[in-house]
Amino acid sequence: MSGGGRDGDSRSGDEQKDGVAGYMQRAKQQALQNVEHAMEGTTARTLPEGKLFEIATAIGDKRLEELHVADTTCGYCAVGCRFDLYSDGEEILAARPTAEEDAPVNGISTCVKGKFGYDFINSDDRLTSPLVRDENGEFRTASWDEALERVAEGLGDIRDEHGGEALSVIASSKATNEENYLMGKFARQVLETNSVDNCNRLCHSSTVAGLAKTYGYGAASISTDDLEIADCILLTGSNTTEAHPVLATRIKQNVRDGADLLVFDPREVQIAEYATQYSRVQPGYDAVWINGITRYIIENDLYDEAFVDERTTGFEDVRAAVQEFGPERVEEVTGVTPEEIESAAETIADADACVFGWTLGLTEHSHGTENVIAMANLAAITGNLGRPGAGVSPFRGQNNVQGGGGDMGPLPDNFPGYQDIADEEIRAKFEDAWDCDISPEYGYYTTQMFLEADEGNIRGMYIIGENSALSEPGVNHAEKVLSELDFLVVQDLFVTETARYADVVLPASSFVEKTGTFTNTDRTVQMVKEVMPPKGDSRPDWEILQDLANRLGRDWDYDDTAEIMREVNSLTPLYGGISQERVDSEGGLQWPCWDEDHPGTTRLYTEEFNTDDGKAHLQGIGYSEPAETPDEDYPFTLTTGRVLYQYHTGTMTHREEGIMQYTPSDFVEIHPQTATNYGIESGDMVEVTSRRGEITVPAQVTDRVGPETVFAPIHFAESAVNRLTDEEHLDPSAATPEYKVSAVRIAPVEGESEPVEFTGSDETTEAGGDAESTEAGGDAETTTGDD
């Protein structure tokens, strides 16, 4: 979430530093005032060296006794790194590796944000008290009682006058599983609406839809360990070293040991430096080159005939559908040569085990589900499922987007565990458990909420830990909607760009200030533990929701999040055997975990798929054009993404002084030939314009992008790259916006320039090491999101 400033800071003297540096500075100042310091030289001359070490150890142990240490799970990206956090009760002083056996994904590795990114917790603008808008339209501090009464009245009046369907909830992939379960329950039981969604809609919902249609589960089929034992790894649409650096390290180690790495991407991202083969592709046409590889494998009898015959249906439909994707056609559309298609196909076919990995470059399209189905077909016909080192792995972005954003059911069409709300038997189970009536009609997806609000069909929103004013496509439209709602409540760590439009802002707690569970990218449920108390009067999301539910006529009485998880167990078969007690004692459990005796599931589809007949349902897929293609007026394709030293809309990382020195602003990457044609040099300010808006950012001239493509990150409100993206053309199955393809034009801004350093780092911090790692992406606890 987002939150507010330090209370009672009475330090004097020189300007104080924050974080670990501040801790060391204060320790030094204290030592200077200590009489023992005056004796230091004498002690060093008179005591034997061994005695000095004994004294140092004793002092160190005494200081550690005064600190609180908790093993927890990282609140940035969904890799799910675990480590110990040290706190003096006021701030996080250090992050250190936990026991390697207790960190199943990262071992002793961390990324730069997970190791150092905690200054946001004590930021001067952290929200520590509720805010309400006064009669003059200005925010003022309010008590919790006043603020919650205002929220209950505002949401309750809309529900009672216009019906629950006039309300919507945007849940938080930064919050815990238990809190997201309550967000979905609050929407349906208390507000009487199915319009509840989360940032998963803006990122991997097409992954969920595509994999659910073919295999049954919309999640990674592998364990992270499979990345180190695969013979071949195909990555597409993934800037792995910058968005998921700890995973990138495991992949690179495997490549160094002899595995093949195939990278297909519009940009020559850093992981491509390690690739056996890198192929630059035209943005928006991924199904074309994937189908081209599938066609080559089928035509040359390189597919796994036994697996196809015994464990799949629909193969002949796939064979027929890929016929149009001959090598010349693929090269014409995507720029990938016949030689590259042949090489990739032969490499995949020759491998004993291959992992197919992707992120948002494959999914954030108006046809993202088609792309994912094409990839699912390729993995299945080569038999790369259900075996060690073989499977599909969509790398998730926010720390709990797998669990909180999907598994826990804050979705317009699913209850927890992906149980369809239209199913009468399932719906009756939840109606009985929650003591309410639930409509069988699906609610609105996130971007649809904003479109429907424009039509007057959504009148009030409750936004928890999302910064929709920056993360929604078509930011100009999102700002208009937020400003015109009858009532808006935002729950976050800071007064975000979204919170500035709110009638009430509620201060939530960060992930270091609460207890619960997160579920990482390979379905592993892990503990999150309170390291320090909530700042000021901020509260965990579950406590806020419980208070609001009771003010709106319900009788919630949860004592803690462990009790909430027990309710999840009773209603969600996938989590039937997952309790906080088991997770804590066993170090993590992967779903499905059907009962308390089940060990969890390391690898999906070892025996059958989660379909009615137990087989993978392959589907013949063609390809769809992007909703918008370059033309004479807008001759370039803009694609967007992340950089290592920032996280999503910056709610957390913009408050980290050290991190901001690496990437202080957004930028636009332009190919050298394009730059020459336009008279642009690195550092020059460039105006980037689409049919929806314009931004001005400094140029980075680089051949990472092709001559017809430009790239911009997503992290800064000042540039707000989503002013350029399209909110209207959504994937028909998943309602994912087309973030990755926008037609734009560029122009230099005369006389303006600023220094630009090329960002991107690639070391991973090991225990005892000093290297800043690459990262593993996300945005504040319940905090702002855009996966």
Image: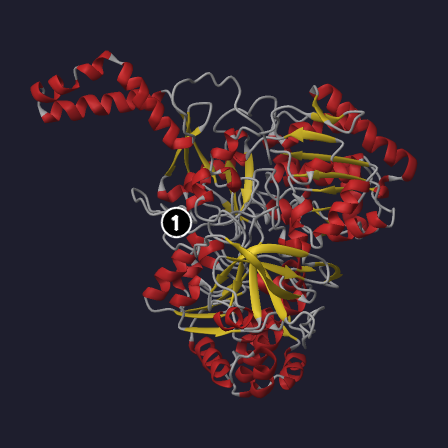
Counting from the top left corner in percent of width and height, residue 513 is at 53, 29
Residue drawn where x is 52% and y is 53% of the image: 522
Counting from the top left corner in percent of width and height, residue 500 is at 70, 36
Counting from the top left corner in percent of width and height, residue 304 is at 52, 78
**Is 502 drawn above or below residue 700 in the view shown?**
above
With 731 as the anchor, is 47 left or right in this view? left
- What's the coloring here? secondary structure
Number of marks: 1
With 763 as the anchor, is 410 left or right in this view? right
Instruction: Determine which quarter of the picture holds residue 741.
Output: bottom right
Q: Nearer the viewer, residue 711 or 152?
A: 711
Task: Inspect this view and state whether residue 440 appears.
Answer: no
With 37 as the anchor, is 538 left or right in this view? right
Residue drawn where x is 55% and y is 87% of the image: 299
**Is 570 drawn above or below residue 419 in the view shown?**
above
Point out the residue furthest to the top here. Answer: 35
**Is 424 drawn above or below residue 226 in the view shown?**
above
**Is 27 drawn above or below residue 480 in the view shown?**
above
Pick the quarter of the image with the N terminus: top right
Report crowding for label 1: few under 14, some 14 to 19, many 20 or more residues within 10 A (C-alpha). many
Q: Nearer the viewer, residue 3 or 287?
A: 3
Residue drawn where x is 78% and y is 49% of the image: 449
Point out the residue furthest to the right here. Answer: 161
Q: Nearer the viewer, residue 430 or 342?
A: 342
Instruction: Determine which quarter of the picture holds residue 466.
Output: top right
Which amino acid type is shown beneath numbered disc 1?
Answer: Ser
Does dot 1 land on a helix, a strand or a loop?
loop
Counting from the top left corner in percent of width and height, residue 455 is at 87, 50
Task: Inspect this view and state whether residue 169 appears.
Answer: yes
Q: Which residue is mark 1?
A: 773
